[in-house]
Amino acid sequence: QVQLVESGGGLVQAGESLRLSCAASGSIFSIGAMGWYRQAPGKQRELVAVITSRGDTNYADSMKDRFTISRDNAKNTVYLQMNSLKPEDTAVYYCNADVKMDWARTYNYWGQGTQVTVSP
């Protein structure tokens, strides 16, 4: 069993920064791509950013100038640095990871989500 646990969410004012963390634990052989998604009330879940095990990154266009994704493979942890936050960034942020249990099995996991609220 694998768990992804997010942390770092909270309430901030517009223009401020937050850093989210997501740590994977459990029966992990290795981790492939890790990413962050978000879901605002009444909207579909959307991609924020993704990072491969080699460190290649991809961002949603609306966030690539303000958000930075990174990872520490030794700690099985992915981070999301969010700068210049806007009220429209308010959402529940979810961590996602492709986890290899062994050479043959790879499963996709989601964290429980962490709330980010940005006040005007």
Image: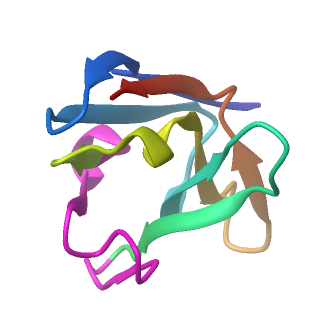
- Identify the colour scheme used: rainbow
Q: Nearer the viewer, residue 82 or 3?
A: 82
The residue closer to the viewer here, 10 or 6, is 10
Residue 74 in magenta? yes
User: Left or right: 110 with respect to 15?
Assistant: right
Of residues 102 and 11, which is closer to you in this image?
Answer: 11
- Magenta segment: 54-79
Locate residue 94: give its quadrant: top right
Q: Is residue 118 magenta?
A: no
> At 75% from the left edge and 56% from the top edge, which residue is drawn?
45
Q: Quadrant of the C terminus?
A: top left
Relative image position of residue 47 (x, y in whole percent) = 59, 67
**Which residue is painted at 73% across and 48% down in the image?**
109
Taking the spot 33% from the left edge, 34% from the top edge, the residue there is 20
Counting labels gives 0
Whether residue 48 is situated above or below residue 118 in the rendered picture: below
Q: Quadrant of the N terminus?
A: top right
> Is residue 33 visible to the viewer in this orientation of the structure?
no
Q: Position of residue 63 (x, y in %)?
A: 35, 68
70 lies above or below 28 = below
Query: As drawn, which residue projects farthest toward the front?
Result: 120
Q: Residue furthest top?
A: 11
Judge whether 108 appears above or below 21 on screen.
below
Q: Horizontal placement of 115 versus 57: left or right?
A: right
Tell me which residue sits at (21%, 47%) in the image. 81
Where residue 23 sits in the image (x, y, percent)?
Answer: 42, 32
Measured as percent of width and height from the top left, residue 96 is found at: 61, 52
The residue nearer to you, when weighing 67 against 118, is 118
Evaluate whether residue 42 shows in this view: yes
The image quadrant of residue 21 is top left
